[in-house]
Amino acid sequence: RLIVYVKRLLDFSKPLTPVRQSITAKSLVSEAIKLVEYSKDMEIKIINPSSTIELNVDTNLLIPVIVGLVKNAVEAMNESGAVRIKIYRKKKDSVIDIIDSGPGLPDTVKQKLFEPFVTTKSDGTGLGIAMARKVIQSHNGRLTFFENSDRHVDGKGTCARITLPITGHDT
């Protein structure tokens, strides 16, 4: 466990240089979902996916980020509930919303969410969200969290929003 912790800490401290390739937002999310383990009582569904949103990203960096965010959503609901992933275009950006039907983020965590070593998990390192933000920022994107207000998911829940420039618009 210590070796994993030190490796994550060293990875976090290194600068990122994405090796970009063209992929649709839908394909990126679909590839990530295939890697998430969840119970039969859990439903993960992509809503209204557009197959025309092209991204120029490093899939080796972004797929693990999406896997981690979906896993966090699954774990927040204790293996029973729904995760909805909405992919859509907003001006010159692609938006990927990962929405769960869990209890939502505790207020104490909301304020420190992007700080390293902040975790709600007993076996967590607290580097996952901070590293996810770093990866997304290396793609000129943004990672934000807010309380769920989506009609597609029951419960209070949380929405993790990834905003990335669409190919041809990222400068």
Image: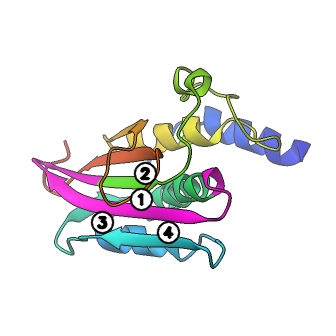
Residue for point 48% across, 46% down: 157
State the residue position of label 1: 58
State the residue position of label 2: 18
- Bin the neighbour count of mark 3 within 10 Å (Cα to Cα): few under 14, some 14-19, many 20 and up: many
Give the magenta range: 75-95
Q: Is residue 81 magenta?
A: yes
Determine the secondary structure under disc 3: helix
State the residue position of label 3: 25
- Bin the neighbour count of mark 4 within 10 Å (Cα to Cα): few under 14, some 14-19, many 20 and up: some
State the residue position of label 4: 32
Task: Report x, y in % for residue 53.
Answer: 19, 66
Q: Amino acid at mark 1?
A: Asp
Q: Main secondary structure of the magenta part?
A: strand
Say how many tags the image has.
Answer: 4
Image check: 3 left or right of 107? right
Give 11 or 152, whichever is nearer the viewer: 152
